Amino acid sequence: MAVREMTKLTLGPIAYHWSAGMRRDFYARIADEAPVDEVYLGEVICSKRAPFHEGDLPETIARLERAGKTVIVSTLAEVMLTRERKATADLAAMESPEIEVNNAAGLYERGARAHRIGPFMNAYNEATIAWMAGQGATHVCLPAELPGQAIAVAARAARDLGLGVEVQVFGRASLAVSARCYHARAHGRTKDNCQFVCEEDADGMPLRTRDDAPILRVNGIQTQSESYLTLLPEAPRLVADGVTHLRLMPQAVDMVAVADLFRAILDGRTGPGEAEERLTTLCGETALSNGFYHGAAGYRRIAMATPA
Amino acid sequence: MSLAELICPAGTPAALRTAVDAGADAVYCGFQDATNARNFPGLNFTPDELAEAVVYAHARGTKVLLALNTYPPAGKVDLWRQAADLGVRLGVDAFIVADMGVADYIARAHPQARLHLSVQAAASSPEAIRYYCAHFGVRRVVLPRILTIPEIRQIKREIPCEIETFIFGNHGLMVEGRCSLTNYLTGQSTNMDGVCSPAGDVEYARHADGAMSSRLAGFTIARFGPEEKAGYPTICKGRYTAPHRPEGYYAFEEPVSLNLSRLLPELIEAGVHAFKIEGRQRSKSYVRGVVRAFRAAVDDIRAGRQADMADLVALTEGQKQTQGAFETKKWR
């Protein structure tokens, strides 16, 4: 139990184009009510969105820190344009708060100074993690598609090197990024004249097959899973395997309630069956999935053979 | 050979000999396992086959590049290391790598080996490329298919290594090395297993009205009218519906193939060192036709002659072509 109680719950960066007002309300509530220990801020998906909310960053950081949360700023996953290169260089130059790097351009700019490795960095294995640790990484978030067996090997290696190890346990999985904006494309526009249509879809734009089955979500240049990746009964197993941080990705659901459920599982206050039932209710019509963890198709929901 | 090298696909030993005979400056290939991003049934090389292939290619002045461009999941790193060791023993001319752990291993264990950075590493800025050059001694970067020619020219000015770009074949839509679409639907990973929309999960279903559905792992990726040719169910080339597109549309891209033959002179002028032809899964006759045509076109350009592109256009007859991101930012 002791290890589980030390496990940190984190809130990943908002993937969507939520308005500045929505973000302020969201983080105010997270600061006051959510049992998360660490919060990642910053625009990871689209550099065009950053001007809408980056002005609020200092205040949001201060607000969360006053509430006792550790704050980390995440860098862009895709760095190509001049403004993206500059944004990455600016974050890499910061002394505080901590930064999470999501592109090799950020690693180059950061050099040997301490940083976290984000989920877009493809830290799939112990050799890569060891390399990153030697270059100043203090913490690594593993790719969402990594199966449980590999997570266990990677986590052990990372902890032996003194690194924090993070795994996404809730929210849509990032399945792809592109240079093209698929939100703009759906509206007959291009990225340069997108008029920020992605703001209409706070939980991503649903794509359905021609048989009307939900399949994927579009978030600007990003493609996400339709289902919310959910490792709730698996959480104690992750901790036993050496994972130190569990990441919740912000979705358009009651994230305070989601965080409460994960905290309750870690503290042994709720059984996995009951917690999953409550999460299913919280998430409404959105399917939950854990296939990646179990080495199956990501969208699948696999029952745990033996609850940990 | 320093200008406009032609880098050609070799999915099988026969395709390799075909590409060499048709005038490839270099061929790229992989072993029959997860260490490369075209881990498809019936493709790739056994160690013995690769040994023979290296001898065949070198005897004709053609280089052999070994693709080790997937990401080993934790616990399986040795398979990639053994493949690298074997490649060195067999005398391949360069390794195409994406994973930092793999790159670091080769740089340390085989410091004389030449490293190319795979498109799977998604290095799309001078800083990212410089990172791999500085730490692993990467000599050439294969650029993601998302950059315009002015952007490529700008990158070239700021990096210490050669540039290779794709010029022909499948048009990858997603940033390579960051795509888990196939794993989400099938349980096989592009990054870890080298698999993309695997044939074993594909089925075609005919409907009563004559329409045809192409499915991947039970998901309908596209539906075609009776008059249409049913395409392969690649997830990023599927037709879906969205709230504003109830009629169904190609949400990511139409099934087009990349053809930059008209842009070759501009790409050379922008500083591109090597041109890559996609298609390790293609037939010998396809490889022969494409390599011959591009060999002639490149030779014409180097000799200052007007290149005849008619043969290249014919190769994609019946298929839509695109110049993708290379021509204009509007692609984005």
Image (tube, rainbow, N blue to C red):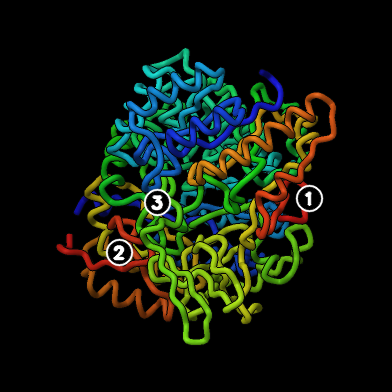
Per the model, the C-alpha gap separating discs 3 and 2 is: 23 Å
Q: In this view, does A26 lie above or below B17?
A: below
The numbered disc on residue A232 is: 2
SS type, badge 2: loop
| Residue B331 place in picture, x, y as percent | 73, 55
User: Which chain is indicated by disc 3?
Assistant: B
Q: Is B260 in front, or is B80?
A: B260
Asked whether disc 1 touches disc 2, contact meaning CB atoms under 8 Å apart, the reply is no
* Residue B309 seen in the current view: yes
SS type, badge 3: loop
Q: Is A253 in front, or is A130?
A: A130
Residue at 41% x, 64% y is B202
User: Which chain is indicated by disc 2?
Assistant: A
Residue designated by label 3? B189
Residue designated by label 1? B328
Residue at 84% x, 26% y is B304
Per the model, the C-alpha gap separating discs 3 and 1 is: 31 Å
Q: Mark 3 belongs to which amino acid?
A: Ser
SS type, badge 1: loop
| Residue B273 place in picture, x, y as percent | 68, 27
Q: Mark 1 belongs to which amino acid?
A: Thr
Q: Nearer the viewer, mark 3 or mark 2?
A: 3
* Residue A94 seen in the current view: no
| Residue A230 place in picture, x, y as percent | 35, 64
Q: Mark 2 belongs to which amino acid?
A: Leu
User: Which chain is indicated by disc 1?
Assistant: B
Residue at 41% x, 16% y is B110
Kindly indicate the quadrant of the structure image that contains residue A123.
top left
Q: Is residue A79 left or right of residue A3?
A: right
Placement of the C terminus of chain A among the 4 image quadrants: bottom left
